[in-house]
Amino acid sequence: MLRFLLWSHVLGVVGFYLVLWFRTNPNGGKRETTGRAGSTFDATETNKGRTVSVIVPARNEEHNIRRCVESLLEQDYDDYEVIVVDDGSTDGTPLILDELMASHPHGERLYVLRLRNDLPKGWAGKPHAIHKGTQEAPGDWLLFTDADTWHAPGALQFAMTKALNEGIDLLSLVTKQELPGFWNKVMMPMAYIGITLQYPIKLVNDPQSQVALANGQYILLRRAVYDILGGYARPDLRNTLLDDRDLARIVKKNGFRLQLADGHGLVRVRMYRLLQLIGLPIVTIIPFLLPLLGWLKGGSRRKGDSISTGELYSAALLELGPILAYRRWIDKVLNVPWYYAFTHPLAGALFEGVLAQSTWRVLMRKGVDWRGRHYYSAREETAKAIVRDIIS
């Protein structure tokens, strides 16, 4: 029986990482080059007259806002403006924005919309801030981006040219994650695995697939499409804590073209997200325990055990091979040193604890804390959506 369980586990882990590879790797291991700073896309006549309103929701972002706004004000694109929605910040964010408007060479492009600290009933903070920003935006296109991003000078030019030339209604860029310190490098690859497993890029970009996702760090959207769909004022978007994913689903469901593209050379951000809860220890922790079990068994004097030391080592080799190979690919994408692959079980254990706590808070309706605001899961469908994303 023990031998059957061992080799069933080996088959399951190896199969899991093989499926993960084919499901999440859209280009046979080669990263797209369309999102590189040296893109072959050129500025064309089709860009003229295509104004863009960049909307940046910001709440208590004094450590990030200067870098973000300065990079946005220095874009190699003519017809655009930057609208920062200061969502009731209580730190130094307002003063930094005032300084940028007064002193930056392109400060005339910057408009700051200041909101009160209290939220209208039925709204979450970010959807409300974006909604208020769009009400002030005259652009033909809307760019939603976060305050913790940095944009290369050619980012907006690239995105607009690509969207116009390829007839894309919502273009979202996958950004480069800045991972300073040990724990960021441990945690982010695990989060990346979870996101790409549930939302493979090749399915997101397939019009025939129902899988939809956008990266809230960079969403370029036709204003006409936003207005047709009702934008974040829609009842099903006002209170969402998954604003980027839910917007992408609505855009794709209504027949508009959605594309998620590589923007690693164009936009950088420091952030991480969460992944699935069920089965996490099975595919991240147990395989790394098998060599230890083999070593312990090698020193045991017990006779008649059904599993030999050689079998344990063989099982460990078969499981760890695809795990480490897949992690090496992920680490290369994220520019993480190779030896962090051996922190895979540590990341799995940490995420297991974080996700268990998050799931419990949602199920118990204890709400979610975000930037000084507490969101209660008053709407049953919202709670179910969050739990489904965590444990599905």
Image (cartoon, rainbow, N blue to C red):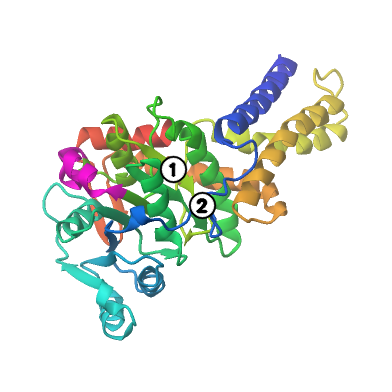
- Residue 39 placed where, x, y %? 53, 55
**Position of 211 relative to 175 (above/below):** above
Name the image quarter holding the N terminus: top right
Within the image, what quadrant is residue 323 found in?
A: top right
With 88 as the anchor, is 345 left or right in this view? Answer: right
Point out which mark residue 110 bears. Answer: none
Q: Nearer the viewer, residue 143 or 44?
A: 44
Whole-number angstrom distance, CA of label 2 to CA of label 1: 10 Å
Magenta highlight range = 221-236
Taking the spot 47% from the left edge, 33% from the top edge, the residue there is 198
Q: Secondary structure at mark 1?
A: strand
Q: Nearer the viewer, residue 235 or 153?
A: 153
Mark 2 or mark 1: name the one nearer the start of the chain: 2
Residue type at numbered disc 1: Leu
**Is residue 56 in sight in this rendering?**
yes
Residue type at numbered disc 2: Gly
Q: Secondary structure at mark 2?
A: loop
Outermost residue on the front side: it is 45
Point out which mark residue 260 bears. Answer: 1
> Would you say the magenta stretch is mainly helix, strand or loop?
helix
With 116 as the anchor, is 311 left or right in this view? Answer: right
Taking the spot 59% from the left edge, 31% from the top edge, the residue there is 20
Counting labels gives: 2
Contact? badges 2 and 1 (CB < 8 Å) = no
Report the mark closest to the observer, 2 or 1.
2
- Residue 229 placed where, x, y %? 19, 39
- Residue 26 placed where, x, y %? 56, 36
**Which residue is labeled 2 in the image?**
35
Within the image, what quadrant is residue 85 found in?
A: bottom left
Q: Nearer the viewer, residue 364 or 263?
A: 263
